[in-house]
């Protein structure tokens, strides 16, 4: 098995320290499967049997292939998709959740390990039957532990006991697990008739929401909690509150449909088509099967090798489309939710969101699809289409935590008109970001006087010495330092900027930088020693 990444090691050790019970949250594309395989390897060293449960057939096959590759000496079986292996011949059994909870499903010996992939999916009466006392060790894996009901608190947390921070987007960028990203927001307009219908449904939804909160005690915020309360009330169909909840949900759904299928977004895809045609691969995230098919048709008409990927295709057709996408025969997919979870896709340069989601989990998964590392360190690009004055409008708080997380790690963010969007995207695809340069460092070269002085300051930052890193004045040196600082957490970056004088002020001592940032001197010393390793590499190559 290959060596774990830093975050994977930390998460695995935290899981073991928690008694081998816990849920690891790690965003899509950062490699949470490897944490599961590490737990399996540890289990087999103790002669434990292992059951891996997954929600889809695609994940069943992906897990089987990955575990066979990483643990070639271990017997691995499958349950589901026509496979009927059991624990008589398999030390590790990978099963769909549906097969795992069937009557007569194979059971491991007591004391086994359960690995539950996409564990947020199992917070129901039926699926939670897999949470057996037979498993002493329990590992859940998910991009984010979130559901629209009470399943997390009712079934999932009590069973796994601990939640472990694995890898968020900021950590993924710092560790170069995720690609650098640029973000573009583009406003598109409703037709007059679409605007009239939207305003009509919006008025109904707003009025119903106000009364549901004021009269029937629905939680105002966050929105997910409000929707949970409304869903419960809607089951009381013969009561006034149930009818009001139903009216809200109907108006809410009609608003979303108008946003998903509006003519302006299809026109915008036509405008973006030349840029998408020049990208290596792209995904357009839609909301409905109809909008996926319409969007793909528009892109094909404008020269993009595109296909819809939705539940409208049978399994064989979906498999064929993905194979063509991996091979490059197709360079674009337009997909609703069927692509959000559990599908292995190659590195994608551009993600276009034509329909937002009220699910934070779904938007995080979409980000992970596009932020996977790319050959040559290429940057990713997100294009977010929105209708102004609606729940999609970033100025009105749309996308909530998703957009904040995306902008927190973005190297560049712009809001442009539709007429400028294609040109801007083409420029991004042809103008590389050099934030992740991987220079060959001349470690054996003689140490210059300025560099020796710099190393002395770093070795003894508490001495109060002022760093005069003259090599930053070499051609490209200062820009390289700024690019490196841009990848750091905010506090680390502020310390580095202060010590290096990258803010236009004279360089400061670490103690002075600590006072400037407002942190303890000892903490600043640790931060600076960590940060300087990267600065040193950039400085040596000039």
Image (tube, rainbow, N blue to C red):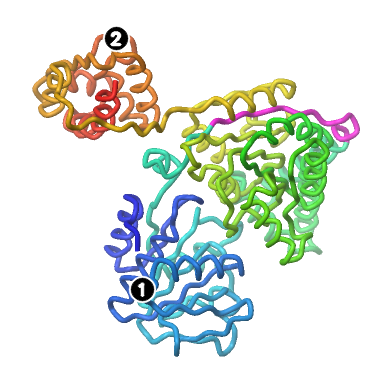
Q: Which residue is drawn at 33% across and 60% down?
A: 12
Q: In which quarter of the image is residue 517?
A: top left
Q: Quadrant of residue 485?
A: top left
Q: Is residue 186 magenta?
A: yes
Closest to the observer, 423 or 229 = 423
The crowding category of the residue bearing disc 2, from other C-alpha atoms within 10 Å (few below 14, some 14 to 19, many at least 20), is few
Q: Residue at x 47, y 37 (%)?
A: 376
Q: If you read the primary sequence from the N terminus, does the residue marked by circle 2 or circle 1 appear first?
A: 1
Please name the residue that numbered disc 1 is placed on. Answer: 137
Query: What label sits on residue 505 in the rendered view?
Result: 2
The crowding category of the residue bearing disc 1, from other C-alpha atoms within 10 Å (few below 14, some 14 to 19, many at least 20), is many
| 118 with respect to 416 (left or right) | left
Q: Residue at x 37, y 42 (%)?
A: 175
Q: Which residue lies furthest to the right in this view?
A: 193
Closest to the observer, 215 or 133 = 133
Q: In which quarter of the image is the N terminus?
A: bottom left
Alpha-carbon distance for marks 2 and 1?
A: 55 Å
User: Residue 81's spot in the image, x, y percent?
Assistant: 63, 76
Closest to the observer, 32 or 229 = 32
């Amino acid at each position: 098995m290959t060596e774990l990444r830093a975050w994977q090691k930390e998460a695995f050790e935290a899981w073991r320290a928690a008694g081998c019970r816990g849920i690891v949250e790690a965003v899509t594309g950062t490699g949470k499967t490897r944490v599961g395989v590490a737990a399996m390897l540890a289990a087999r060293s103790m002669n434990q049997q292992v059951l891996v449960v997954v929600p889809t057939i695609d994940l069943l096959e992906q897990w089987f292939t990955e575990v066979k590759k990483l643990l070639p000496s271990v017997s691995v079986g499958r349950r589901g998709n026509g496979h009927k292996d059991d624990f008589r011949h398999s030390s590790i059994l990978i099963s769909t959740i549906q097969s795992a909870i069937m009557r007569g499903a194979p059971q491991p010996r007591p004391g086994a390990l359960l690995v539950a992939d996409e564990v947020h999916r199992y917070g129901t009466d039926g699926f939670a039957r897999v949470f057996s006392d037979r498993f002493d060790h329990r590992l859940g894996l998910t991009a984010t532990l979130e559901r629209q009901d009470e399943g997390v608190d009712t079934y999932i947390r009590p069973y796994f006991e601990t939640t472990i921070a694995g890898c968020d987007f900021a950590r993924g960028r710092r560790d170069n697990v995720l690609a650098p990203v640029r973000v573009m927001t583009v406003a598109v307009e409703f037709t007059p008739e679409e605007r009239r219908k939207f305003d009509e449904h919006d008025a109904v939804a707003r009025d119903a929401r106000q009364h549901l909160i004021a009269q029937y005690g629905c939680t105002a915020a966050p929105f997910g909690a409000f929707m949970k309360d409304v869903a419960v009330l809607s089951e009381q169909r013969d009561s006034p509150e149930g009818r009001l909840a139903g009216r809200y949900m109907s108006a809410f759904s009609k608003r979303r449909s108008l946003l998903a299928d509006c003519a302006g977004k299809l026109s915008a895809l036509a405008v973006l088509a030349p840029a998408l045609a020049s990208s290596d691969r792209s995904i357009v995230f839609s909301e409905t099967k109809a909008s996926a098919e319409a969007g793909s048709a528009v892109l094909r008409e404008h020269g993009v090798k595109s296909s819809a990927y939705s539940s409208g295709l049978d399994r064989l057709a979906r498999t064929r489309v993905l194979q063509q996408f991996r091979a490059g025969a197709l360079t674009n997919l337009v997909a609703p939710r069927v692509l959000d979870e559990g599908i292995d896709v190659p590195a994608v340069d551009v993600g276009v969101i034509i329909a937002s989601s009220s699910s934070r989990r779904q938007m995080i998964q979409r980000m992970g699809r596009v932020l996977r590392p790319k050959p040559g360190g290429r940057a990713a690009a997100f294009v977010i289409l929105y209708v102004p004055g609606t729940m999609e409008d970033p100025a009105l708080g749309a996308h909530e935590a998703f957009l904040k997380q995306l902008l927190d790690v973005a190297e560049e963010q712009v809001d442009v008109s539709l007429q400028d969007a294609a040109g801007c995207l083409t420029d991004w695809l042809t103008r590389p970001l050099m934030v992740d340069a991987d220079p060959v460092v001349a470690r054996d070269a003689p140490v210059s006087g300025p560099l020796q002085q710099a190393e002395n300051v770093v070795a003894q930052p508490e001495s109060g010495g002022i760093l005069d890193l003259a090599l930053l004045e070499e051609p490209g040196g200062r820009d390289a330092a700024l690019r490196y600082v841009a990848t750091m957490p905010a506090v680390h970056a502020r310390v580095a900027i202060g010590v290096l004088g990258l803010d236009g002020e004279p360089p400061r001592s670490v103690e002075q930088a600590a006072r400037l940032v407002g942190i303890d001197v000892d903490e600043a010393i640790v931060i600076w020693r960590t940060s300087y390793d990267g600065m040193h590499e950039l400085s040596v190559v000039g």
